[in-house]
Image: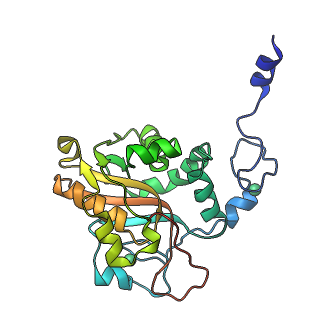
Amino acid sequence: MKASEFLEKFRRPNFTCDICGREVFGGERICRRCNEALPRIGEKCCPICGRVQHAEGICLECKQTRPLFEAARSLFRHEGEAARLVLRYKNGEKYLSRTILELLLPRFKEFPEADAIAFVPMTARAERARGYNQSRLLAEGLAQKSGLPLLSAAEKVRETDEQKSLGRRGRQKNLEGCFKITEKKAVEGKTILLIDDTLTTGATANELTKQFLAAKAKKVFVLTVTSVGDPTSADPARKRPGSD
Ligand SMILES: [Zn+2]
Ligand SMILES: [Zn+2]
C-alpha cells in the first residue's frame, strides 16, 4: 500500500470545526460550542419575509410592499460567525457548502408544499470568476437529499450593479429584466422553494419570483442561510452584505 493510499484510508471526513478549527469527534463539521453560538432566528420574525424584528406580526417593509413570494425563512441573522461563514463560502471556500447544507436540512421540513427546488442564477461570467454558484450548490444538495427535482430553469442574462450602494427603488430597477426563464414548462404549476445565501432587502428573491410566477409557477417560497434584520430597526450591528 502506498503512503497516499494509507493516508486516504484513515483520513476522517472532518477533523476540525469549520468555524473555530478545534478538533471535532463524531464527524460533525461544526463543534457544539460554535453551533450553539450561531445567531439562530427564532419565532420572533416577520411571518412573510422571515426577518428578525422587534415588533410582532408583519414587518413594516412587508406592509408597505408585500413581496411576491409566499414566505421567506432564514436560518441565522446575518451577523457574527453566521455572516462570516457565508462570506467565506462565497469567497472561495467552496467546501463549506456541505457544512451549510447540513445546517439547512432541518429547516427544509417547514416547506412541505414545495415540489421543486430552485436557486438564484449567476451570469456565466460571474460564475466563471467565482468558480461555482453558491446558491446552486446548496439547492443541488437539498434536491439530492429530499428527492425533489432541481429546477435549472432560470438564467441571469445581464450583470447588475452592486446592490449595496443602491436605495430601495434603485435595487428594484437594477434587477428589472436581469432574470429570464429558459424552461417555462418545467416551472408551470410548481410550488418552488428558492434557495439563496442571504436575504437582504429581498429584491433579488422578489424579482426571480416575479419571473417564476409569470411562467405560471403556483407559488414560491424562499429559504436562505442568513437574513439581515428588520431594516426599520436602529440596530447598529446591522450591516448590508454585498448581494441580496
Ligand atoms: Zn468550533
Ligand atoms: Zn417582513
Residue 231 lies left or right of residue 237; in this view the side is left
- Answer with the quarter of the image where residue 163 lies: bottom left
* Figure quarter occupied by ligand 1: bottom right
Q: Above or below — where is 136 with respect to 52? A: above
Number of marks in the rendered image: 0
**Residue 151, percent from left and from top:** 32, 43
For the view shown, which residue lies furthest in the top direction?
Answer: 1
**Residue 235, percent from left and from top:** 57, 85
Q: Nearer the viewer, residue 169 or 63?
A: 169
> Colour scheme in the image?
rainbow
Q: Nearer the viewer, residue 198 or 53?
A: 198
Q: Nearer the viewer, residue 232 or 179?
A: 179
Residue 196 lies left or right of residue 82; in this view the side is left
Residue 55 lies left or right of residue 5; in this view the side is left
**Residue 81, percent from left and from top:** 67, 64
Of the 4 image quadrants, the one containing the C terminus is: bottom left
Of the 4 image quadrants, the one containing the N terminus is: top right
- Answer with the quarter of the image where residue 25 lies: top right
Q: Above or below — where is 157 with respect to 167? A: above
Q: Above or below — where is 212 with respect to 240? A: above
Q: Above or below — where is 111 with respect to 64? A: above
Residue under the point 21% across and 41% down:
183
Residue under the point 63% across and 57% down:
85
Residue 112 seen: no
Residue under the point 39% across and 78% down:
167
Residue under the point 63% across and 47% down:
93
Residue 174 seen: yes
Q: Nearer the viewer, residue 55 or 186?
A: 186
